[in-house]
Structure formats: structure tokens, C-alpha cells
Amino acid sequence: MKFLLFLASLLLVVDSVMVVVNGKPDPSSKANQNPNATTWEKCVKYCSEEVTCLLAYDNEGKCEWFQHENITKVKQTTVLEEEKVAFKVNNFSTSSCPSGLNPPTFDNQDAHGVLLIPGEYDNPNRVNYTIKYTAGTWEFSYFEQYACPTDFFVLLQRENIQWCMSVEVSTDRPFTSFSYDAAVTTCDNQNGSVLTGATNAAEMEKIKTMLSNLLSWRAVPNESFALRLDGKRTSACQATPKTASCMTEQGFTFMDPNAQLDYYTWATNAGARTSSGDDCLVLKAELDKPMVVDVQSCTSYTQFPAYTVLCGVEAWNYRTGK
């Protein structure tokens, strides 16, 4: 493996490349060290594979590497100074290193990179960064975003998108049961989330696990309660809830753009309507009993108090703040 110190070189990885140039980090930078990387090539390779690394530095034969929060500037040096760094940047569209002065900002065009850093609670942090070159100095700027609004959401993979899901619990004391309208408002207050439900088997199991945890932790006052799900019966189907089409997704309005009914185990079926106004979906949770979906009142007067709400929002695409 060879690196052209002044003209730059590439170490190809899946989504990024390492560009090696003469330079040294600003003295204000805070380095990590990897004593196991005994050669410069190993140091560069380590940084290319370490998800939090965006710059490697050959400090008199010692391998130093930097995380985004610990570096803002790199000073350009000459070949004679024998100092070199390796920038991690987005892969180039060509199979060979581009030409131009001052790489990785070839001919002073901004370079860009992305780090996807796993989160402690399965909520990864995406760090987009830009590298600008001015008068012998490269400077980093950063924009960070977590996949989900908070760590109370779980990140799930749907067929075409990633989806964040959270169970919201009544904050009233004593606890109060959510109506459908109150559930919609509660979700919207969570960074523009919407009422959601299960669109695949994995999501259904995750929902059941979250509710089981609430029961075992006694986070709700009852050993039986309901979870508000996405789904409200259409006006047209209220008179004929048991017709074939009304017992499918066509019989309900949804806020979740990927809503499905296929992964629910029903208390009876999707056409249930014991009383007038029983038109909204809930998941019934009872200690030591199977969880089942039912169609119950859209008011707060459900069979089991609806102390919880299931909210969801597309990952990376939520409203900041409330």
C-alpha cells in the first residue's frame, strides 16, 4: 500500500475514502492514540474502519486519530516537515484520486464527509461535516442529527424507510385515559410524530415488548390497560363495519403513511363495534395474558383505560423542538 504524501492518495472503503496530505492538527485538538497501529498504513486503515474517526495523524511515528468533537482545524505543512494526516471524506465518483491543489479540497472546492455513530440506546447520530481550505488551513464545520427525536424512541427498519416509535404514557396524576383526539395531540407534541401501528412482525413484537416492560415495571397503575393505535373507522363503514372492505385498511383512516392491519391478533375481528362510537383501534394489555387489538371507543371511555399512546415518525425527518 502506497500513499502519495503531497498529491494525496486513496484508501477505498464502503462509503468514504482516506485522503493523505502533509499537515498537522491544530494544537487545540484532542487526539486519541492507537498503539496497536504500528505503521502509518495501519493507522490510516484503522481510522477508515473506526466509525467515529474522521482524521488520522502520524505524530512522529505514533498513530493519533480524532473524533469530530475534538478537532476543528488542520494546518497545511510541506513534504520537508515530514508530517502527514489522512482525512476521511465522501467517496469520489471516479475510481482514481482527483487532481488539483490542496486536497482533499481539490482546487479549494469544499470536501464533505459523513459519520454514522451508534447510539447508546439504539439511536445513531449522523454527523455531516464540511472541510474548507483557506490560506494554508483546513477547517471543519459540523451538523449533527440523531435518527430519532429522543432516546425514548426505538429505531425500526421498514421496507423503504427507517421509522422511530415511542410509547407515550399519561403524565396526569392520577392517570387519565387518552381519547383518540388527545392521542393525536400527544404524538404531535413529540417532534411532529403521528399515531402509528405495526407494519411488520418485528414491529408488532417490539410493541408487545414495550408494553410488557410497562406492566412489569408497574409504570402504569393497572394490571390491564390499553394502547392507542393508529386507525379510526371511516364514516362510511360505521354503519356496515363487518363488510369485507370495511374489515381491511380501506375501512379506516390512518395517520401513518405505511399503515397495515395484517400483523394484529384481534380480540374478535376488525369489524367489531359493540357500541356506537367504537371506531378506534387499541391494543389491550393484561398481565400474563396475550395482547390483542380491538376496536373501541374514540373517547376516553375504553374497556381498559388508554393510559398509553403509540407515536411514530420517519427517522432523520422529524420536527425539531415541539
Image (cartoon, helix red, strand yellow):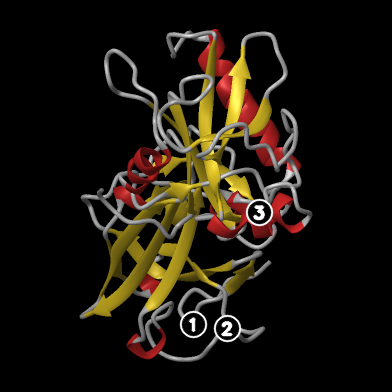
Q: Which residue does the image show at 56% across and 60% down from the upper left?
A: 257
Q: Which residue corresponds to mark 3?
A: 158
Q: CA distance from mark 1 to mark 3?
A: 43 Å
Query: Which amino acid type is marked by label 3?
Result: Arg
Q: Callout 1, which amino acid?
A: Leu
Q: Secondary structure at mark 1?
A: loop
Tell me what residue is drawn at x 71 percent, y 39 percent.
202
Relative to 300, is 13 above or below? below
> Which badge, 2 or 3, comes first in the chain's sequence?
2
Q: Which quarter of the picture shows residue 1?
A: bottom right
Q: CA distance from mark 2 to mark 3?
A: 36 Å
Name the kind of residue labelled 2 in the image. Answer: Cys
Instruction: Specify whether residue 86 is in view.
Output: no
* Viewer-nearest of discs 1 and 2: 2
Closer to the chain start, of discs 1 and 3, is 1
Q: Which residue is identified by label 2?
A: 97
Answer left or right for 150 relative to 257: left
Q: Which residue is mark 1?
A: 7
Farthest residue in the right direction? Answer: 244
**Most foreground residue, 176 or 236:** 236
Q: Nearer the viewer, mark 2 or mark 3?
A: 3
* Quarter holding residue 185: top left
Residue 266, position as x, y percentages in the image: 73, 33
Of residue 57 and residue 143, the one placed in the foreground of this image is 143
Q: Is residue 233 left or right of residue 1?
A: left
